[in-house]
């Protein structure tokens, strides 16, 4: 892996090239590795799209120099965009449903962005609608729209995927990544399939989410506590391509919560519920490969830990399951 051994000129130069770390509670013969995205300057995987999307939009003229981005976001994307916007001379406005992490909203404001809250009951659809209204009211304003912009998966095709394969010398059998906007999974999956078409690709979602419907499964829709992945309406997640996915694994809130606590206690990873879910699914995939149930082209299973548990301390993420669930 490339590491930063020389002085750097800008915080944007620290985005990406995150470490790939062994998850030790996995079969010896089928190691699981996690791309630990908390090492990004804004402490999440969304720093990658913040930098990549804004740079490409400025280059193409989609975003005028000194213009404004208005993005509906639950938080990490806002932080990632805010980190990049501040360094690229762009103003940022984020539309966030009220119920989402207070810590994330505080960080967006600290980075110089404006935060506009929308009612919790309106969900992300309400935030998206309000973002487009605000953009229409402002001069030189655009909505990057992470849920539908092809630059989102392109960022991971150009950076995250190659970094994984460089670190493992191409010895990758399966990719197991949580699916929210689907940008990370789609970008890495496309790169992986180009390296070997039989790479096994797993999308991870919470129980109660509906991505599994895209593979013909009849799953119940329910509320879930895991943040950052899953969907109640797959038609709004325009980036998701079921043809790039071999299977969709659903993880229960309790299993994800148990795993995020185990990762901290046993392996020193301070990661959140989406990482807990990804780890559960990745370890399960590795065990199936070790048992001969899956035939894959390489030894390693690769997952991704998107962000830090520090963003969720106010939600009792390390409390009992009942406390966190409530």
Image: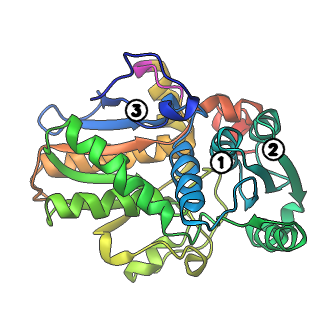
Q: Give whichever of discs 1 and 3 has the lower sequence position.
A: 3
Q: Which residue is mark 1?
A: 81
Prevailing secondary structure of the magenta residues: loop
Disc on the earlier residue, 3 or 2:
3
Tell me what residue is drawn at x 55 percent, y 76 percent: 234
Q: Residue at x 49, y 72 (%)?
A: 239
Above or below, comparing residue 173 to residue 86 in the picture: below
> Which residue lies at the image location 53% right of the left edge and 76% below the top edge?
238
Quarter occupied by the N terminus: top left
Name the residue located 53 percent from the left edge and 72 percent from the top edge.
210
Q: Is residue 271 visible?
A: yes
| Image quarter of residue 191 | bottom left
Query: x%, y% of residue 53?
Result: 55, 56
Is disc 1 surrounded by few (<14), some (14 to 19) or many (20+) residues within 10 Å?
many
Q: Report the front residue among 79 and 89.
A: 89
Asked if the residues shown at circle 2 and circle 1 are in contact, with their CB atoms under 8 angstroms apart, the answer is yes
The count of marks equals: 3
Relative image position of residue 103 (x, y in whole percent): 77, 35
Along the horizontal axis of the image, is 316 left or right of 191? right
The magenta stretch is 266-270
Would you say residue 138 sits in the magenta stretch?
A: no
Where residue 172 sits in the image (x, y, percent)?
17, 47
| Label drawn at residue 224 | none
> Answer yes or no: do the residues labelled 3 and 2 have beta carbons within 8 Å?
no
Which residue is label 2 attached to? 113
Q: Secondary structure at mark 3?
A: loop
The residue pinned by badge 3 equals 18
Q: CA distance from mark 3 to mark 2?
A: 25 Å
| Left or right placement of residue 315 versus residue 25 in this view | right
Relative to the observer, which residue lies in front, 247 or 43?
43
Quote the CA–CA distance across marks 1 and 3. Answer: 18 Å
Q: CA distance from mark 2 to mark 1?
A: 9 Å
């Amino acid at each position: 892996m490339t590491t930063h051994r020389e002085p750097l000129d800008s915080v944007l130069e620290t985005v990406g090239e995150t470490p790939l770390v062994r998850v030790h509670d996995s079969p010896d013969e089928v190691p699981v590795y996690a791309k630990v995205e908390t090492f990004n300057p804004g402490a999440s995987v969304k720093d990658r799209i913040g930098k990549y999307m804004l740079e490409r939009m400025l280059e193409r003229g989609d975003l005028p120099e000194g213009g404004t981005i208005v993005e509906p976001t639950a938080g990490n994307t806002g932080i990632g965009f805010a980190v990049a916007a501040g360094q690229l001379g762009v103003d940022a406005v984020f539309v966030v449903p009220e119920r989402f992490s207070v810590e994330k909203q505080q960080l967006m404001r600290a980075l110089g962005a404006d935060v506009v809250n929308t009612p919790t009951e309106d969900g992300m659809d309400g935030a998206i609608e309000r973002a487009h209204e605000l953009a229409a009211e402002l001069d030189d304003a655009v909505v990057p729209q992470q849920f539908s912009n092809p630059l989102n998966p392109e960022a991971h095709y150009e950076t995250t995927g190659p970094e994984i394969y460089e670190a493992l010398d191409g010895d990758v059998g399966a990719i197991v990544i949580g699916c929210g906007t689907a940008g990370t999974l789609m970008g890495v999956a496309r790169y992986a399939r180009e390296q070997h078409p039989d790479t096994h690709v797993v999308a991870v979602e919470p129980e109660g989410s509906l991505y599994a419907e895209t593979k013909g499964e009849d799953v119940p829709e329910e509320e879930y506590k895991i943040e950052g992945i899953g969907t109640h309406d797959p038609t709004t997640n325009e980036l998701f391509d079921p043809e790039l996915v071999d299977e969709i694994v659903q993880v229960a809130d309790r299993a994800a919560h148990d795993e995020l606590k185990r990762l901290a206690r046993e392996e020193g990873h301070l990661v959140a519920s989406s990482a807990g879910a990804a780890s559960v699914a990745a370890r399960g995939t590795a065990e199936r490969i070790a048992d001969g149930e899956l035939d894959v082209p390489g030894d390693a299973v690769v997952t991704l830990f998107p962000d830090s548990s520090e963003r969720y301390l106010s939600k009792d993420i390390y409390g009992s399951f009942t406390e966190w669930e409530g």
